[in-house]
Amino acid sequence: MTGLLQALGGRVIAGLHGTGQSLLLLLRLLRGAPIGVRRPGLVIEQIYTLGALSLVIIVVSGLFVGMVLGLQGYYTLTDFGAAEQVGVMVALTLLRELGPVVTALLFAGRAGSALTAEVGLMRATEQLSSMEMMAIDPERRILVPRLLGAFIAVPLLALVFSAVGVFGGYLVAIGMVGLDAGAFWSNMQQAVSMQDDILNGVIKSVVFGFVVGWIALHKGYTAVPTSQGVSRATTLGVVHASLAVLGLDFLLTALMFG
Amino acid sequence: MQERLVEIWVGVFVVIALLASLFLALQVSGLAELRQTPGYQVVATFDNVGGLRERAPVRMAGVRVGRVERIELDPQSHQARVVLRIDERYDSIPVDTRAAIYTSGLLGEQYIGLEAGWEEEALSAGDRLQETQSAVVLERLIGQFVRSMGE
């Protein structure tokens, strides 16, 4: 009995410890953020590896998500004789939810895992300690540019995702199903608002980019310095980042569109 | 060289993202339409605007001549006060034009239809459309129908 209680207590304390540690790390990283202005080259390099190299997966999945949305929307909406509204459905779903969320999930899988593994391996091979020996702050030199890179890359990727998705929906609705292009666009323009839909979607993706980058870096930075520890940190990073994105999405949706 | 390539790719990435946001802003949200087209405002009061929304089109003979700018409740008369923005090029609409709220299709959006009057004098900024016809509220229609059936 006491053993069970002890296990539970230990778990809770470890969890709280991890949370507090990651928060402290975040605060230190935020304080170090000006390095992004002083040495923009570091951040640009990260935008390249995190953002530009993720473009292919984002464009391809955006296209297919949009096409599937268009097709499913068409099947459902024709029952109500409202097939012209398919553009509205595709655009609003993408801009408000799927664009930011799927981008963040893909980003966590494609780039977040790489971040965790990279930083974790730096820890395991004692590159971080040797930097400290050379009086270089590894948090500022390694972590901050990566966090800023994720913070900048994810909103841009989400915008690309939404735009490509709308185009995919257009391809299905006009090319495959044969709806009228004019009605498709004009209904969409009637329903979509710049502030309520597009801007809120961008705000969401900014938050997601930040959270995914933060979780991935924290997992890597605190990884147990063995090959097993790094692999475990990578898995946990992706899982936690995905869960955080989904949970935050619900919160943000309730705040924004309530 | 390596450095340069990285920067070029980041530039390409940012340009693609900018194009995407431009596409979303202009083509998807119709921000281009939101841009103040030169025009003049006229006011119409309705007993009931139904599901009319701001930015809804204003049509005359089916042709789009403007859009609904603002809908508010007149605190004195308790009627809906709808401000319409008519495009500048339609400057010869008669003053006794009638405004009515119609629905496009059975479930479609609501819009304001204008029916030209006979006066020589044209509408100008700030004028009020005298004759208006409210939106058809389905429940009220059904209520009337049921009552007439009962008689």
Image (tube, rainbow, N blue to C red):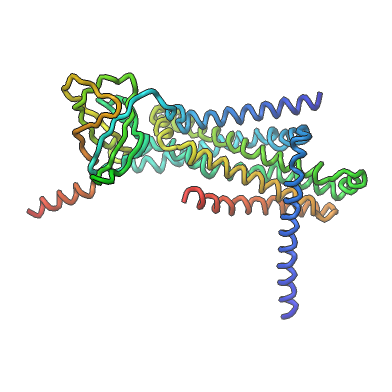
Above-or-below relation of B15 to A4: above
Front-most of residues B116 and A110:
B116
Q: Is residue A5 left or right of residue A170?
A: right
Which residue is painted at 49% across and 28% down in the image? B26
Task: Pick the quarter of the image with the N terminus of chain B.
Answer: top right
Evaluate whether residue A69 shows in this view. no
Residue most toward the front? B76
Above-or-below relation of A186 to B151: above
> For residue A42, what is the image quadrant?
top right
Q: In this view, does A94 lie to the left or right of A30?
A: left
On the image, the x and y values in percent for residue B116 come to 20, 25
Which residue is painted at 62% across and 46% down in the image? A207
Front-most of residues A254 and A81:
A254
On the image, the x and y values in percent for residue A220 come to 78, 50
Which residue is painted at 67% across and 26% down in the image? B12
Residue most toward the left? B151
Numbered label tally: 0
On the image, the x and y values in percent for residue B91 come to 29, 20
> For residue B84, what is the image quadrant?
top left
Residue most toward the bottom? A1
On the image, the x and y values in percent for residue A256 come to 50, 48
Q: In this view, does A85 lie to the left or right of B16?
A: left
Evaluate whether residue A199 shows in this view. yes
Q: Is residue B23 left or right of residue A12?
A: left
> For residue B121, what is the image quadrant?
top left
Which residue is painted at 27% across and 37% down in the image? B103
